[in-house]
Image (tube, rainbow, N blue to C red):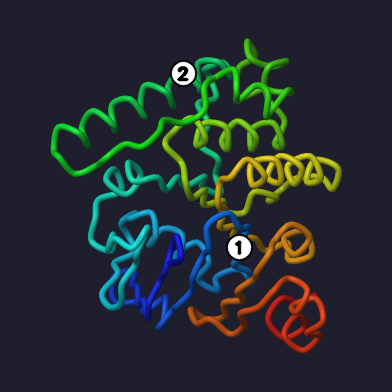
Amino acid sequence: MSLLELDAVDAYYGESHILRDVSLTVEEGEVCALLGRNGAGKTTTLRSISGARPPDVREGRISFKDEDVTAMDPEDISARGISLVPEERRVFPNLTVAENLHLAEVSENRSNTVGRSLGQVQVEHVGMTTEQVYEEFPRLRERKTQKAGTLSGGEQQMLAIARALKQNTDLLLLDEPYEGLAPQIIADVEDAIRRISDSGTTILLVEQNAVAAMDIADRCYVVDQGSIVFEGTAAALRDNDETRDRYLGV
């Protein structure tokens, strides 16, 4: 059984048909990359999985842990163990690193309480403690009293990921984590993603930087104009010059 499965998903923004018959799977414990040019449908796929509106999923099924989550609200999907780190990162710039992490903990506790009260969610574990987060991201410990808005782009990305890990996260959705980062900072974020994966968290990574994504991914999908045009291992994609040139420009 795959941890996540999309089966023939069609998604729309208003009347604009964005995702067309998208099917993909993410296996437990792997890093899976969804690659494609700007506007190909990558972010729409993540938003569909996380329950964000828009887009509107009109056809197909999205399953997580063999449960249909297609029509669920984002809060219910999050409580089941899916966390999205959006491209914009969305840290609270006027709060310190420690305060940003504390807010994530408060949000997780509220989500678990609501889920149990409705009888909808069986919480198996909670997210990382603050101390565990600092062990994974030593730089955040160094910056814990610093306001998030003064952090570098890479540090803000680490903080955004850390907030997600403080929640009940079995599947981490990362939307363009390397966007706007210098090559050395990308390497630091890559190292952090590898550590998270090694600790047992499954990752679905959306990225335009195909070269960096292939370095870290076990398997890759390529999407173009809302449709999957390639599925295979990262090694197979590296060897497929035609696909990389036609759909990724690398």
Q: Nearer the viewer, residue 41 or 232?
A: 232
**Residue where numbered disc 2 is placed:** 102
Q: Position of residue 9 (x, y in %)?
A: 36, 76
Q: Nearer the viewer, residue 233 or 47?
A: 233
Q: Is residue 93 above or below residue 45?
A: above
Q: In this view, does 236 lie to the left or right of 100?
A: right
Binning the other alpha carbons within 10 Å of mark 2 as few (below 14), some (14 to 19) or many (20 upward) gives some
Q: Is residue 134 left or right of residue 78?
A: right
Q: How far apart are marks 2 and 1 (CA)?
A: 29 Å
| Image point (44%, 78%), residue name | 22
| Quarter in which the C terminus is drawn | bottom right
Q: Is residue 5 above or below residue 158?
A: below
Query: For numbered disc 2, what is the local secondary structure?
Result: helix
Q: Is residue 178 left or right of residue 69?
A: right
What kind of residue is marked 2?
Answer: His
**Residue where numbered disc 1 is placed:** 32
Q: Residue furthest left?
A: 118
| Image point (45%, 45%), residue name | 83
Q: Quadrant of residue 110?
A: top left
Query: For numbered disc 1, what is the local secondary structure?
Result: strand
Binning the other alpha carbons within 10 Å of mark 1 as few (below 14), some (14 to 19) or many (20 upward) gives many
Q: In which quarter of the image is residue 62?
A: bottom left
Q: Is residue 200 left or right of residue 242?
A: left
| Image point (75%, 46%), residue name | 190
Q: Nearer the viewer, mark 2 or mark 1?
A: 1
Q: In this view, does 80 lie above or below 134?
A: below
Q: Residue furthest right?
A: 184
Q: Position of residue 183 (x, y in %)?
A: 84, 48
- The answer to whether the residues at label 2 and label 1 have Cβ atoms under 8 Å apart is no
Q: Where is residue 203 in the image (x, y as percent from the top left)?
A: 57, 53
